[in-house]
Image (tube, rainbow, N blue to C red):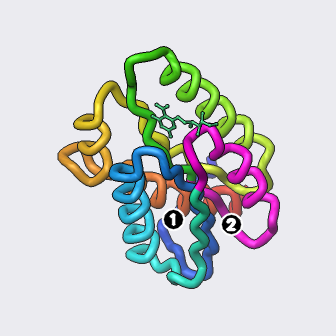
């Protein structure tokens, strides 16, 4: 039986990060965690490209285009969708998740979903470097594993 598993070796890896400006108090922390973890795993700062977009809904398009450049080995999508007074939250969550999922299946490189969908800002901050960890950091490790596993197929 052959078992393949991904490594966290980030040396010589090129990573694109697409991050939403909406709720930047949270998304900047997600981005910081992502970059810190990538560098801890050996990714050179010069091999990381960051693309800021207006909001989570705009992430899938840019993630698609970045993935198709041939300049990155993978893409991380970062955002924070926090429930408000209207049903807008539901539509943004659903379409952002569906859009990123579609891109992840059609992109030539792996695309990781690091968009927080929370009921309030406290929950979001907990997951952006607070007591529940950092979703961006998790995605950084996940992306390196995915790049490594795909290379073994
Ligand atoms: O990234 C977010 N975008 C949000 N809306 C903007 C959306 O992502 C688009 O940028 C906008 O609809 C224009 O297309 C959010 N809410 O409205 O709640 C949110 O919480 N987070």
SS class, disc 2:
loop
First of labels 1, 2 by sequence position: 1
In the shown orientation, is residue 104 left or right of residue 136? right
Instruction: Specify whether residue 5 is in view.
Output: no
10 Å crowding of disc 2: few (<14), some (14-19), many (20+): many
Q: Is residue 139 above or below residue 96?
A: below
In the shown orientation, is residue 34 left or right of residue 91? left
In terms of depth relative to the viewer, which is nearer, 18 or 24? 24
Residue at the image position 33 percent from the left and 25 percent from the top: 119
Which percent across, then down, holds residue 93?
Answer: 53, 28
Q: Which residue is mark 1?
A: 7
Quarter holding residue 39: bottom left
Instruction: Specify whether residue 85 is in view.
Output: yes
In terms of depth relative to the viewer, which is nearer, 81 or 106? 81
Which percent across, then down, holds residue 25?
Answer: 34, 52
In the shown orientation, is residue 62 left or right of residue 37? right
Residue at the image position 40 percent from the left and 52 percent from the top: 24
**Which image quarter is the C terminus in?**
bottom right
Separation of marks 1 and 2 at Cα, in angstroms: 14 Å
Give the number of the disc on residue 89.
Answer: none
In terms of depth relative to the viewer, which is nearer, 60 or 47? 60
Which percent across, then down, holds residue 86?
Answer: 45, 16
Q: Which residue is mark 2?
A: 73
Q: Is residue 60 magenta?
A: yes
Instruction: Identify the magenta region.
Output: 53-76
- Toward the front, the furthest residue is 85
Q: Is residue 45 above or below residue 75?
A: below
Q: Is residue 16 magenta?
A: no
């Amino acid at each position: 039986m052959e078992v393949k598993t991904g490594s966290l070796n980030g040396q010589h890896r090129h990573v694109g990060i697409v991050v939403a400006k909406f709720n930047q108090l949270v998304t900047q922390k997600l981005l910081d965690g992502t970059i810190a973890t990538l560098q801890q795993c050996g990714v050179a700062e010069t091999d990381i490209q960051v693309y800021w977009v207006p909001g989570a809904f705009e992430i899938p398009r840019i993630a698609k285009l970045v993935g198709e450049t041939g300049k990155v080995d993978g893409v991380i999508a970062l955002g924070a969708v926090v429930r408000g007074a209207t049903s807008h939250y539901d539509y943004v969550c659903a379409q952002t998740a569906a859009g990123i999922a579609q891109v992840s299946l059609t992109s030539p490189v792996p695309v990781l979903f690091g968009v927080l969908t929370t009921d309030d800002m406290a929950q979001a901050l907990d997951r952006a470097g607070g007591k529940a960890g950092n979703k961006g950091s998790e995605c950084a490790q996940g992306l390196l594993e995915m790049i490594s596993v795909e290379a073994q197929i």
